[in-house]
Amino acid sequence: MSDPPGGGPPRPTRRSLGDFTAREVEIVELVAAGLTNRQIGAQLHISENTVEYHLHRLFYRLSISTRAALVHLWDSHHPSAGEST
């Protein structure tokens, strides 16, 4: 773990995408497909706030701050995720 500048609780080091829960994988796949938090919530039958909670947790655990960075990481570890056979 590393200490963030300015104090506060230590921030975890970047974790593997393999550490995702099944729900987090569902959410990341839908983010990668271009859906909004509201659309993701509707599709998964969860609230928009729950989607935001999962995304904030992922951003923190992966030391990223944007959906684009999340999709980039996802695509780099799952290159065939967006391809059809």
Image: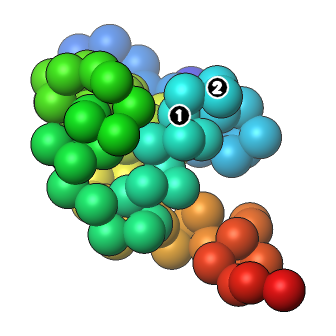
- At 25% across and 36% down in the image, what residue appears? 42
* Quadrant of the image containing the C terminus: bottom right
- Helix, strand or loop for disc 2: loop
Residue 60, compared with residue 30, is above or below; it is above
- Helix, strand or loop for disc 1: helix
Q: CA distance from mark 1 to mark 2?
A: 5 Å
Residue beneath disc 2 = 21
- At 42% across and 69% down in the image, what residue appears? 33
- At 68% across and 46% down in the image, what residue appears? 17
Give, as a three-letter code, the residue at label 1. Glu
**Residue 75 spot, x, y in % from top left:** 62, 73
**Residue 68 spot, x, y in % from top left:** 34, 71
Residue beneath disc 1 = 24
Asked whether disc 1 touches disc 2, contact meaning CB atoms under 8 Å apart, the reply is: yes
- At 70% across and 71% down in the image, what residue appears? 81
Q: Quadrant of residue 48?
A: top left
Between 46 and 3, the one lying in front of the other is: 46
* Quadrant of the image containing the N terminus: top right
**Residue 27 spot, x, y in % from top left:** 45, 42
Residue furthest to the top: 9
**Residue 84 spot, x, y in % from top left:** 74, 84
Give, as a three-letter code, the residue at label 2. Thr
Residue 82, compared with residue 41, is above or below; it is below
Crowding around mark 1 (Cα neighbors within 10 Å: few <14, some 14 to 19, many 20+) is some
